[in-house]
Amino acid sequence: MIGNFRRLKVMRLARKVLHMDLNADDLTLLTGLQEVFREDLKEHGGRMRDAALELERSMCDKFRGLREERGWSQQDISDKLAEMGIDMHQTTVAKLEKGRRPLRVAEMYALSWIFGLPPGAVFWIPAKDKMPYSMQYMSERLAHIGATQHEMRQQFLEMFERQLAMYADLDSERASLVRAMKEAGASADSTVGGLEASDDG
């Protein structure tokens, strides 16, 4: 695999590619790196595929754990998915949980929604055999985080409304001052005009 030094070179090169700031040496390095990546893919491609499939199997197992934690049946999951417009027979749920059927992105989002989790959260739930905390603890922690975020959002909205009201008051005062200055200027002009006329007389 690519060493640390080469990783640094790749990162620097990536920045140059983004800014379209490549010279001849950079292009030579880029060509060389592409060849290294191709060789790495040949050598490690199978392991990368296995790792990706294992991640998918692990996610399906986590969904099974969440289902069992709630005391739901596979048919319950099928019914809840149907309510969201996703047709999945109970036997398909069983295949998913056993890792015999791939998990689609839309299904992952729907399952996460059913269990009251943000879609990304399932990645961070440890697998059952590596679980340092109980599902109850993690569910309670997620609920606490959600409540805290809701409170922060409310505080932000209240602060925003106060700032908006202050801005509106200042804007109104500014408009009044500008109008008063224009009226004072017009009045001064008419006074000066009247004085000039009396001087001529």
Image (spheres, grey):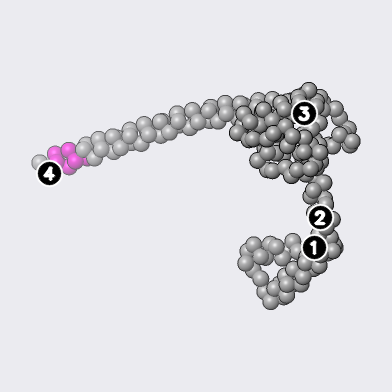
Q: Secondary structure at mark 4?
A: helix
Determine if residue 141 is in view.
no
Q: Which residue is mark 3?
A: 67
Q: Which residue is mark 2?
A: 48
Q: Secondary structure at mark 1?
A: helix
Label 3 close to label 2 by CB (< 8 Å): no
Q: Nearer the viewer, mark 3 or mark 1?
A: 3
Q: Secondary structure at mark 3?
A: helix
Locate the N terminus by quadrant. bottom right
- Depth order, front residue of 177/143: 143
Q: Which mark is residue 200?
A: 4
Q: Which mark is residue 99?
A: none
The residue under the point 33% across, 34% down is 179
Mark 3 or mark 2: name the one nearer the start of the chain: 2
Residue 37 coordinates in the image, percent (x, y): 78, 65
Dividing the picture into quadrants, the one containing residue 150 is top right
Amino acid type, mark 1: Leu
